[in-house]
């Protein structure tokens, strides 16, 4: 059978075989021998071919979905098939199904070819001139135009964006799309500014960090930013070193601190009869040895040192487990630091003991200098106040705490102070007539 009369399955199989052979040849080529300009041209050509192949995959998927092959042969939806056979995520499967509706022509029951919803964008993707990321930006821009606009105006807008996409990167295309919206829908940002469109999701990354993604209406965003603003200011310089955190890092820290303050202050609605709280699960042996890992109530693992820091001042509920990990007995919850002892620590320290920190006592956590899991006493001479930032520093960096005449002092790491001189925070001392009342301390002895 000649290639001009081959059945479609044979044509597709032959095309895929050629693509596979070409890829094998490309992978085996000594590309390092290529002149620079030739390699640059090859990169551009490879990108165009890859984009065209992506569109070819969408055409296959479009027909597969239209004929409901997954449902007819396996009782599955197309999305379920993509997850089970191609091992795609749900989000990627949904994205591709959305793309075939907008970019792939279909055939009606009468045999008539129905053009895609975004014909200009589809043509640009099929030619390899724009990427799927460009197409998603155009899709979002057209989808959010007012339904009251004339169809010819919407078609023109889509064609304009597709033409711009051929010469712009996705970031610049997004700017053009925004400007187009301002022109076609000048009141759109006001009429569409609705709390009902708010969304916020948390997704666990493979590096253990959570990716937060969401959007807020203008009023909601302004409210959140106003609450975060005073907490995301740079910290005062320590030992001549300015706050090294980026604005994005300071914003993230501010969000966590705002949540910590809200939880500590109480007043939130209860859940299942309990106040909102963070739960940490860990064996006593691992807590004492500083090994293994602990688990948060979100299911995320944390390091043993992070668990020790949280356990410094927390509510402990002992649970006896059986050989298969089943709970056999649950004890009563107990505060690691009773309120009376905490009041004594607050009366002595008044705030964070870390040098030059001005965090007051209500913002601080109590820290066991010798951890209670290792036999440290829950007593005034083994407890200090630390703000969350410096509590983390004491647990994870090489700072140490010592007492002199009952007053806590902090010793920096050797890198910052080779002399290892103990330092005291005097910012929280009461004042009389404008002068700080300093408790007698005498000459400081060198630590052992």
Image (cartoon, rainbow, N blue to C red):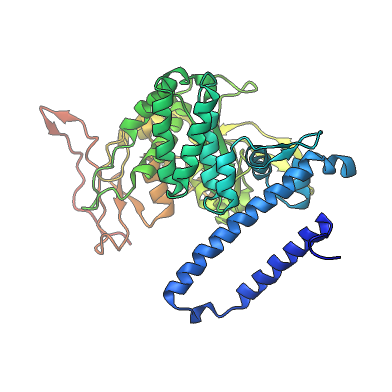
Q: Is 58 on the left-hand or right-hand side of 372?
A: right
Note whether residue 325 is visible.
Answer: no
**Residue 133's x, y, as percent?**
53, 46
**Residue 100's x, y, as percent?**
67, 41
Furthest-right residue in view? 73
Note whether residue 145 is visible.
Answer: yes
Residue at 31% over, 42% down: 353
**Residue 244's x, y, as percent?**
31, 50
State the residue in front, 16 or 206. 16
Q: Is 407 situated above or below 340?
A: below
**Residue 197's x, y, as percent?**
53, 24
Q: Is 305 on the left-hand or right-hand side of 364?
A: right
Residue at 55% over, 25% down: 151
Residue at 54% over, 52% down: 303
The N terminus, quarter of image: bottom right
State the residue in front, 108 or 34. 108
Q: Is 10 situated above or below 442?
A: below
Q: Is 249 on the left-hand or right-hand side of 242?
A: right
The number of numbered discs placed on residues in the rendered structure image is: 0
State the residue in front, 219 or 275. 219
The C terminus, quarter of image: bottom left
State the residue in front, 234 or 58. 58
Q: Is 54 on the left-hand or right-hand side of 339?
A: right
């Amino acid at each position: 059978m000649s290639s001009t009369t081959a059945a479609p399955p044979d044509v597709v199989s032959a095309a895929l075989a050629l693509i596979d052979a070409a890829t094998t040849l490309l992978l085996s080529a000594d590309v390092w021998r290529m002149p620079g300009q030739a390699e640059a041209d090859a990169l551009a050509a490879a990108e165009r071919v890859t984009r065209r192949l992506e569109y070819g995959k969408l055409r296959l998927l479009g027909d597969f979905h239209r004929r409901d092959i997954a449902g007819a042969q396996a009782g599955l939806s197309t999305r379920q098939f993509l997850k089970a056979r191609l091992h795609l995520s749900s989000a990627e499967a949904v994205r591709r199904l959305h793309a075939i509706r907008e970019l792939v022509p279909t055939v009606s029951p009468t045999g008539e070819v129905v053009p895609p919803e975004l014909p200009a964008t589809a043509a640009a993707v099929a030619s390899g001139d724009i990427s799927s990321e460009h197409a998603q930006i155009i899709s979002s821009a057209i989808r959010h135009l007012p339904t009251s606009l004339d169809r010819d105006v919407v078609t023109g807008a889509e064609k304009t964006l597709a033409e711009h996409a051929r010469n712009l990167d996705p970031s610049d295309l997004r700017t053009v799309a925004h400007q187009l919206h301002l022109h076609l829908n000048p009141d759109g940002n006001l009429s569409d500014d609705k709390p009902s469109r708010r969304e916020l999701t948390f997704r666990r990354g493979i590096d253990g960090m959570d990716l937060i993604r969401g959007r807020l209406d203008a009023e909601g965003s302004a409210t959140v930013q106003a609450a975060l603003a005073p907490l995301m200011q740079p910290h005062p310089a320590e030992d001549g070193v300015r706050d090294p955190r980026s604005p994005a890092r300071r914003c993230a820290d501010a969000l966590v601190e705002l949540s910590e303050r809200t939880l500590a202050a109480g007043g939130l609605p209860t859940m299942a009869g309990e106040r909102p709280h963070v739960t940490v699960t860990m064996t006593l042996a691992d807590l004492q040895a500083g090994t293994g890992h602990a688990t948060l109530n979100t299911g995320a693992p944390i390091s043993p040192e992070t668990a020790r820091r949280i356990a410094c001042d927390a509510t402990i509920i002992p649970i006896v487990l059986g050989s298969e990990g089943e709970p056999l007995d649950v004890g009563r919850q107990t505060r690691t630091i009773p309120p009376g002892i905490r009041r004594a620590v607050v009366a002595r320290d008044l705030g964070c003991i870390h040098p030059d920190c001005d965090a007051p006592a209500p913002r601080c956590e109590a820290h066991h200098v010798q951890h209670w899991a290792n036999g440290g006493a829950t007593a005034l001479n083994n407890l200090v106040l630390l703000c969350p930032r410096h509590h983390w520093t004491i647990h994870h960096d090489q700072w140490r705490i010592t007492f002199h005449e009952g007053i806590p002092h902090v010793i920096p790491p050797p890198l910052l102070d080779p002399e290892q001189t103990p330092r005291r925070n005097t910012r929280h001392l009461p004042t009389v007539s404008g002068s700080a009342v300093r408790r007698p301390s005498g000459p400081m002895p060198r630590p052992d």
